[in-house]
Amino acid sequence: MIIKQLSVFMENKSGRLTEITRLIGEANINISAFSIADSSDYGILRMIVTEPDKAVAVLRDNGFSVSITEVICLIVPHTPGGLFRALKILSDNNVSIDYMYAFAMETEATVVIRTGAPQQAIDVLQRHEMQLVSASQIYRL
Amino acid sequence: MIWNEKYECMSRDELAHVQSKRLTEMIERIYFNVPFYRKRLQEIDFQPTDVVDVESLRQLPFTTKVDLRDNYPFGLFAVPQSQVVRLHASSGTTGKSTVVGYTHRDIQMWSEVVARSLTMAGIGREDIIQVAYGYGLFTGGLGLHYGAEKVGAAVVPISGGNTQKQLQLMVDFKSTVIACTPSYAAFLGEAIVKENIPRENIHLRAGIFGAEPWTEEMRAQVESLLGLQAFDIYGLSEVIGPGVSMECVCKNGMHIFEDHFIPEVINPDTCEVLPYGELGELVFTTVTKEAMPLIRYRTRDLTRLHVEKCDCGRTHVRMEKCLGRSDDMLIIRGVNVFPSQVESVLLEMRETTPHYQLIVNRENNLDTLEIQVEVDEQFFSDEMKDLENLKRKIQSNINSTLNLNARIKLVEPNTIERSMGKAQRVIDRRKK
């Protein structure tokens, strides 16, 4: 249930994101979700991709600083209160979230969550019958 | 091991005697052969027959880089051109290049001081030395080359750059010594890691690094990257080239070969000679050079001299690592800043690579300093707060060391231009 997320250090200058997506695309790797955290002169690009290890190798070979972070991908119904229920389970169980980002499709939304305690998060969410995306599902998305 | 025990270990009294004798002869030669110096000496009513010792040397005028440029190209030569066998020239980034000439005996003397230097690092007949200083007008390559041949080492005259070839020969030849700038050494070290060359295939045991100021932190880094012992060699083409002074195994500073070069340290503002141990500008008088002897040449390098006898047995004074060439010194908002100070701060943190650059600019009549630091994977964090903390930490360490506020900019790896020779650490965009 633990998903490997790719994080890339990126300077805030034109063409960097284009370059990264070009490299990923040319390696035939698909990006399932991403977010960018930015400051005034640099950003961190976080991505869920189909082949994380290959993506790391491609980016590293091209001189990028890359790291792999473990995250979980939670599926919540795309209805009012859907995200609230999931987050309440985590906060009731003292799992704090470092950051998260989401993408919604038709009837469901997927939320990528970074927490210091991914396994604990998985356990409590599953105990409450919340749906999580498995690694194999993500990498084939 | 000592190459020339007689001269390198002679008592200070004997040395003073040798210096006075050579100095007197040199001044006489220069008086009759170099119109520029004759005029300077006549202005102070100096008689060519006067005996000059280290004390009375202090009465003589200084020579500066400007004097060398004014006499471009051969105006300061003390021998007819037919006796000159070699010409080197500085890069001349700030104007006309500085030309230096050598007679056959000058080349021999230069080889001798470089041989002494290499012997200090334990280098001898069994060694294979890769000379990765630039060959050509720059004195680094050929200077090391002749000295290395003199000690009987096998010289690989590969010159600077061409990193792939450097690594290949280093492995195939089992080179034991590398001579290059410390920044290029760091670059080679990184390349070895990047190319996944197994550590046991690298046989380096000593590095002869010079031509740019570097720090103790940089030493530790290069030593661990390349698995060798790093030695500091100092020199400048005006005086001879590399081999003016060299660090021995005691790593107690660099021994200046005083039987050839008489050092003084002066207050750069008042020109007053300072006692041993005080920080000031290093000045050299070359007492044995034939083609282009210089009286009290101001190097613009800031250092201290120490005269206490070294544990290695040599009696020649030791100079500390230069704080920087006063040319490299930046004055930012009235604060003196040396790039080497920034390097120390960055490397002490052990989280950054030696790749950094200072960008100095002027905005609204106020000087600004931006320090660009490459974000290496070893400390890249997926979390913004960690990177912001790193920035703040660099900023506060810089502030406490330099007493100056700098803007820290984290940049992607390999975006700061790599140098095969002297690293360009500073970009000053202020209008001169």
Image (spheres, rainbow, N blue to C red):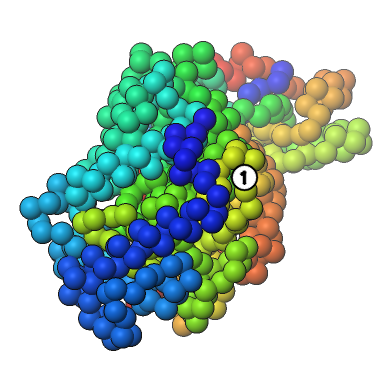
Three-letter amino acid code of the residue under disc 1: Cys
What percent of the width, then of the height, locates residue A100?
Answer: 69, 39
- Residue B55 visible? The answer is yes
What percent of the width, then of the height, locates residue B78?
Answer: 19, 63
**Residue in the picture at 63% in, 24% down:** A4
| Mark 1 burial class by Cα count in 10 Å: few <14, some 14-19, many 20+ | some
**Residue in the picture at 18% in, 62% down:** B77
From the viewer's perspective, is B378 left or right of A91?
Answer: left
- Residue B191 visible? The answer is no
Rendered view: A104 above or below B385: above
Quadrant in the picture for the C terminus of chain B: bottom left
Q: How many marks?
A: 1
From the viewer's perspective, is A46 left or right of B425?
Answer: right
Which residue has dot 1 on it? B310
Rendered view: B251 above or below A29: below
What percent of the width, then of the height, locates residue B22?
Answer: 35, 58
